[in-house]
Image: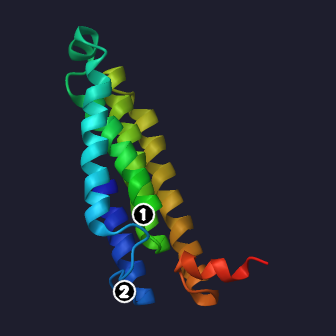
């Protein structure tokens, strides 16, 4: 459900508010890629310190989940458009969910349904907020610097 509904909702919002490609990210793309590679290496290095315990419980799922969480945070921090920051938030949420599933060896169905409904509701609220912000202020958060007194 998350794989179909959330992308559809984001594509609909992008078409409705006519967002083009982001020209000037906060951090240049080359530097962002270097940070991303460093995050992945750091996640695997930190989880390697757990040794045989990590391998027995989660395999490589723990470092992948940690890397996904941190990469989502990197996307949120390195982009100016609110919609792209929402994609980073969804990536972080997916990383948290993936890590919880890997460590706990599965979750009951009722918890999964609750999490999915929570994410869909959050996506709808964020979509509405983005439309409201877009109608009153440009979604580029760099313009908010002019409000400082």
Q: Are marks 2 and 1 in contact (CB under 8 Å)?
A: no
Residue identified by numbered label 1: 78
Q: Is 101 placed above or below 146 here?
A: above
Q: Nearer the viewer, residue 26 or 76?
A: 26
Quadrant occupied by the C terminus: bottom right
Neighbour class for label 1 at 10 Å: few (<14), some, many (≥20)? some
Q: CA distance from mark 2 to mark 1?
A: 23 Å
Q: Secondary structure at mark 2?
A: helix
Viewer-nearest of discs 2 and 1: 1
Neighbour class for label 2 at 10 Å: few (<14), some, many (≥20)? few
* Sequence order check, earlier mark of 2 and 1: 2
Q: Is residue 108 visible?
A: yes
Which residue is at 31% across, 40% downward?
67
Which residue is at 37% across, 28% downward?
107
* Residue 74, quarter of picture: bottom left
Q: Name the spot of residue 14 as percent of width and height, x first.
A: 39, 81
The colour style of the image is: rainbow
Which residue is at 44% across, 70% downward?
26
Residue identified by numbered label 2: 15
Q: Name the spot of residue 115 as percent of width and height, x first.
A: 46, 43
* Residue 126, quarter of picture: bottom right
Which residue is at 46% across, 57% downward?
120
Q: Name the spot of residue 113 as percent of width and height, x first.
A: 42, 42
Q: Find the residue positioned furthest to the right.
A: 149
């Amino acid at each position: 459900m998350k794989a179909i509904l959330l992308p559809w909702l984001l594509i609909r919002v992008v078409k409705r508010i006519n967002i083009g490609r982001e020209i000037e990210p906060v951090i240049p793309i080359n530097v962002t890629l270097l940070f991303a590679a460093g995050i992945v290496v750091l996640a695997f290095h930190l989880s390697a310190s757990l040794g045989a315990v990590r391998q027995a419980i989660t395999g490589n799922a723990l470092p992948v989940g940690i890397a996904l969480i941190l990469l989502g945070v990197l996307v949120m921090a390195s982009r100016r458009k609110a919609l792209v920051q929402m994609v980073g938030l969804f990536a972080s949420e997916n990383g948290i969910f993936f890590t919880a599933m890997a460590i706990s060896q599965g979750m009951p169905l009722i918890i999964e349904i609750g999490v999915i409904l929570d994410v869909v509701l959050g996506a709808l609220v964020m979509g509405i907020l983005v439309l409201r912000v877009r109608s009153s202020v440009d979604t580029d958060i760099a313009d908010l610097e002019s409000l400082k007194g």
